[in-house]
Every structure is written in structure tokens, then in C-alpha cells.
Amino acid sequence: MWTKAGKALLAGCLFALGSGAVLAADADPQKQIDEIKGALPKFAIPMREVGDRFQNIYFAAKGGNWALAAYMSKYMNGAMNPAKVTKPNEYKVWQGFYEGAFAPVNKAIQAKNLKAFEGAYTAVINDCNGCHKAMGYSFIKVVKLKAPADNGVDYKVASQPGDVPP
Ligand code: HEC
């Protein structure tokens, strides 16, 4: 049996649903787009993932798991995709970094050249931090970890860089 309070609650919910539907139909599409954009990550959330994947790349390469290294690099870059929409100008700087300063790291992974990789990897940390400085975040200073950020995968599975599915 419906109690009085239950009925009132149900009526309230139906009213809220009804008025929501009316609102959505009336809403300005630009405002809705802005609201969705506002809910997408900017730089801080994707950068968390960039930071972790970047650390993992090193241990994957070192362990001869070249596919994992290539994979981590690919999705380190992919993590920044929301910034294409939320921070288009800053995203271009990221894209320039990934296609420029970071290219020697990717090249060494593809060539399975550990020596070239170590040099390129160490050097690019300065570029990560250079961008932090340029964007007003000199207090975010990337340092190389002694162990991967994520310990839940095996860094020593022998693999080829080309093993990553497209
Ligand atoms: C295009 C400029 C740019 C580049 C290149 C860049 N970063 Fe960042 N990073 C930022 C900005 C800006 C922030 C601060 C977050 C914000 O503005 O919301 C940040 C924040 C971070 C953070 C802190 C995230 C948090 O909130 O916990 C880490 C970790 C990080 N970056 C790692 C890296 C690493 C590793 C690289 C290089 C592989 C790198 N970043 C390259 C711009 C950059």
C-alpha cells in the first residue's frame, strides 16, 4: 500500500523528471556543450596518467617488453585527448612535445635500442619540466622513479614494439 509520504515522494520525483525534460528541450545547445566541456578533464587529470605511463615506459623497455613500452607511450599521448577540446592551445604545445622532443624515445623503442632509449628518456625529462615551468608549474618537477608507477603488470614479457594492436 502507498503511504502518504510515499505518494508525495513519487509525485515529487515525477515532477522533477517532467520539469527536467522540459528544461532539456528548452536549453540552449551552446550552454549544454559548455557544460559538457566543463565536465571534461583539462590538464591535471590526464597529466596524472602521463606521469605514471611515462615512468612505466622505462621499466618496460629495460625489461625487453618493447610492446608494453610502445603501448605505454601510445596511451600516454592518448591520455591527453580531452585537452584537445578543453585546452586547445595548450594541447598544441603537448602535441609539439610528443611529436618533437619525445620522438627520439619512440624511435628508440621502435628500434629496440636500449642505449639510445636510456639517453633519450633521461633527456626528455627536462622537456617535461620545461613545459611545466613555461606554463607556471615549475613546482611540478618530474623525477625518475626507482620502480614503475604500476606494479600490476609484468615488465619482462619478451615482446616486439610492433605487437601493439592498432
Ligand atoms: C604541454 C606542456 C606539458 C608537457 C609537455 C608536460 N606537462 Fe605535465 N603538466 C603540465 C601542466 C600545465 C600541468 C599542471 C596541471 C594543470 O594545469 O591542470 C602538468 C602536471 C603534471 C603532473 C602532475 C599531475 C597531478 O595533478 O598530479 C605530472 C606528474 C606531470 N605533469 C608529468 C609530466 C611528464 C612525465 C611529462 C613528460 C613526459 C609532462 N608532464 C609533460 C604541462 C605539461
Image (cartoon, rainbow, N blue to C red):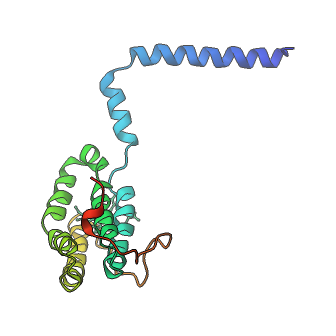
Q: Is residue 133 visible?
A: yes
Q: Is residue 12 above or below residue 119?
A: above
Q: Is residue 142 visible?
A: no
Label count reads: 0
Q: Quadrant of residue 11?
A: top right
Percent position of residue 95, x then y? 18, 57
* Residue at image point 16% right, 54% down: 92
Left or right: 124 in relation to 51: left
* Residue at image point 37% right, 72% down: 56
Q: Quadrant of residue 27?
A: top left
Q: Is residue 48 above or below residue 17?
A: below
Closest to the observer, 53 or 23: 53
Percent position of residue 100, x then y? 12, 66
* Residue at image point 49% right, 16% down: 21
Percent position of residue 120, x then y? 19, 79
Percent position of residue 48, x then y? 39, 63
Closest to the observer, 1 or 162: 162
Closest to the observer, 156 or 20: 156
Q: Is residue 113 above or below residue 32?
A: below
Quadrant for the N terminus in the image:
top right
**Quadrant of picture, ligand 1:** bottom left
Closest to the observer, 71 or 88: 71
* Residue at image point 79% right, 19% down: 6
Q: Quadrant of residue 148?
A: bottom left
